[in-house]
Structure formats: structure tokens, C-alpha cells
Amino acid sequence: MRRFDYYQPQSLSEAFNLMERLKGDAVYVAGGTDVIVKMKQGAISPKALISLRGIEELRGMESDGGIKLGSMVLFRELERDPHVGAKYYAMKEAASLLANPQIRNVATIGGNLCNAAPSADSAPPLIVLDAAFLLEGPGGSREIPVEEFFTGPGSTCLEDVEILREIRIPAPENKSGNAFVKLGRLKQDIAVVNAAAMVMMEGGVCKRCRVAVGAVAPTPLRLREIEQMVEGGSIDEELLGAVESKVKELVSPITDVRSTQEYRREVSGILVKRALKEALTRAQM
Ligand SMILES: Cc1cc2nc3c(=O)[nH]c(=O)nc-3n(C[C@H](O)[C@H](O)[C@H](O)COP(=O)(O)OP(=O)(O)OC[C@H]3O[C@@H](n4cnc5c(N)ncnc54)[C@H](O)[C@@H]3O)c2cc1C
């Protein structure tokens, strides 16, 4: 790995100034669990790293009816937070299944999102929980829905100097449940496929549904056609069987070191079905 300079700004404005000065030669680093691996593999070789660790504005969680997560929140914090565990099950499940405790103690939610792997475990939960992201740059801030953030494998709508500041998740509706499921080659490995679902039930009828699946398309994918199939009726085995078949038609996976495209296609239907079942059970509790 080639030598690099390391900067530790203490505020967003200091980070923006550094990035504007070093543009092209520097990358932001949060926990470093993606950045350092890429540097070691020679996939990137920046002259400078700008650490986000010292920036207070990016830390902490705040409940405001919903929840606001600073982008530097660690997966270990998410996994352990009682408020996240009580309402945002899908997020808690994704956090507890990501990598291992050592990685979760340094890996941040912001890093997972900005790295923009199609398999990123935090993406499907945030899609079904209807999250929005606060992005900030030298010119000010803008809020965007989660689905607009990912633009391709490894790419996002962040502009050069911009930083993901905060993830905003609204409070889940009454009578709703949400869930995350994942299949890896080993437990706590990067996902072969992952999926999340949210359902809101009234009198046995699904009033609202959201479904998302990861590692089966260039970006994490919201499955609107599945949502339309589920909304307006009861969720029974017959419907879940039809959902499983339809998901397989909607995804466009690739073959890579973790799996074949055929296996991913097969498993995506099963995982969406499982996530829906689990979300339904929770909505009925
Ligand atoms: C052994 C191992 C196992 C892993 N297992 C999993 C797994 O099971 N599931 C999974 O999803 N991932 C997994 N990962 C990948 C990685 O740990 C996660 O993606 C992690 O959340 C990245 O966070 P980080 O803070 O380390 O990001 P970093 O490596 O610091 O940064 C990642 C990218 O995001 C950018 N960035 C970071 N924060 C911001 C910000 N606030 N604003 C703008 N840009 C920013 C950086 O410039 C960089 O491009 C694994 C990695 C390893 C090494």
C-alpha cells in the first residue's frame, strides 16, 4: 500500500475545505473497513485520507417520533440500541448480521451506504422503512429519499465534496411490522442475497407493503410490483407462493465469487417470502 497523508478535521466545514483543496487526491474515511481493504487490494490509491471520526455533527442518534442517525453511528450501536430494537427490527437485524463484532465496532452506517455495494445490508431495511438522507456540502444541505441515493454498483448521487450527514427514518405506522433476512456463504458474511419487508395490516387486510432486495441488481432494489400484489388482500400461502415466483422474474443478478446468478435468482424469491412472513407476524403482535 502506498504512503498517504491522514487528516482529522473536527468539523464539517473543515472537512469540506480539505476535500476542495485535495480534490481528486483524497477520499473520506469513516471506519475504514471498505476503504482500507480497497487500498490494500490496490483498487484505489489516494494520496490522502480525510477521517470523519472527529466530526461531532455526524455522531449520535436522536428520537423525534422517528429516529435520526448520524452517519458515523456504528453497527454495534445500532445492534444494541433499545429504541432501534423496539421499532426498527429490520435495521437491528441487519446490524446484528453484518460481518462480526470486531467489524461492527468500527463500521459505520454511513460508510456502508456510501460504499454503495449492491449487497449493502443497511440498504433494504432503510428502503422499506422509507428513510431519507441528509447530504451536506459547502453550499448547504439537501434531503433525498433513500432510493435516489444509489446510482450503480459503488456509485451514489453524492457530489465530489458532499458528505452523508444523517439518515432519517420516520416512525413505523401502528399495526405494522418489518423484517430483514439474509443469506451469506457463512453466517455474518457479505450477503449472497438479502431482503427486507414492511407490512401494515388492518382487519386481516394488508393496507401498505414495502419490499426491497439486495445483491440481485446493480443497486439495492425496491420491488414495487410485489408491493402491489400484496396490498389490498390477506397474506396467505397462495399469495406468498405467487410472490416467490414473481420476485425471480423481477431480479437481474450476476455471477461472482459469492454465488451464481441462477442461485441468487432462486433464493431471492424465498428470502422475500420469509421477510414478508416475519413482517406479518410482527404486525399482528
Ligand atoms: C471482513 C468484512 C466483512 C464484511 N461484512 C459485511 C457484511 O456482512 N455486510 C455488509 O453490508 N458489509 C460488510 N462489509 C463491508 C463494510 O464493513 C461495510 O460496508 C461498512 O459499513 C463500511 O463502513 P465504514 O465506516 O468502514 O466505511 P469506510 O470504509 O470508511 O468508507 C466506505 C466508503 O464510504 C465513504 N464514506 C464513508 N462515510 C461517508 C460519509 N458520511 N459521507 C460520504 N462518504 C462517506 C468513503 O469515502 C468510502 O468510499 C464487510 C467488510 C469486511 C472487511
Image: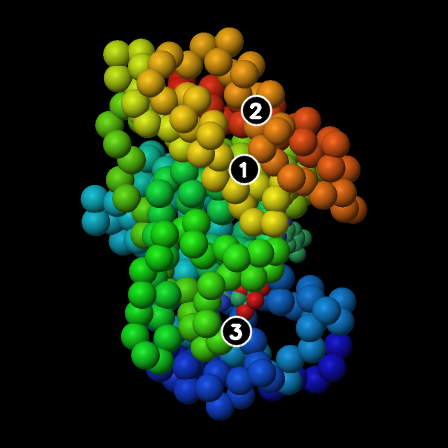
Residue appearing at x 50%, y 55% in the figure = 150
Of callouts 1 and 3, which one flags the residue occurring earlier in the amino acid sequence? 3
What amino acid type is highlighted by mark number 1?
Val
Say if mark 1 contacts mark 3, CB within 8 Å: no
Regarding residue 76, the answer to whether it shows in the image is no
Query: What number is the disc on residue 196?
Result: none
Label 1, on which residue? 213
Q: Dot 1, crowdedness within 10 Å: few (<14), some or many (≥20)?
A: many
Assess disc 3: are there few (<14), some (14-19) or many (≥20) residues with their C-alpha within 10 Å of its C-alpha: some
Residue 124: where, in percent of width, then height?
49, 41
**Quadrant into which the N terminus falls:** bottom right
Q: Nearer the viewer, residue 250 or 177?
A: 250
Q: In what element is the residue under mark 1?
A: strand
User: Residue drawn 42% across and 28% down?
Assistant: 227
Does the CB distance between marks 3 and 2 fall below 8 Å? no
Residue sitting at x 61%, y 49%:
218
Q: Secondary structure at mark 3?
A: strand
Tell me residue 116's x, y (percent): 56, 56
The residue sitting at 42% across, 43% down in the picture is 127
The CA span between labels 3 and 2 is 40 Å
Query: Looking at numbered disc 2 in the image, what kind of residue is underneath it?
Result: Lys
| Quarter holding residue 282 | top left
The residue tagged 2 is 246
Name the residue carrying label 3: 28
In depth, the one of 26 and 74 nearer the eye is 26
Tell me if the residue at label 3 has its CB under 8 Å from ligand 1.
yes
Q: Position of residue 82 (x, y in %)?
A: 34, 40
Q: Earlier in the sequence, mark 3 or mark 2?
A: 3
Q: Which residue occupies the extreme left position in the image?
A: 65
Q: Label 1, label 2: how many angstroms apart (C-alpha)? A: 13 Å
User: Of the residues tagged 3 and 2, which is closer to the observer?
Assistant: 2
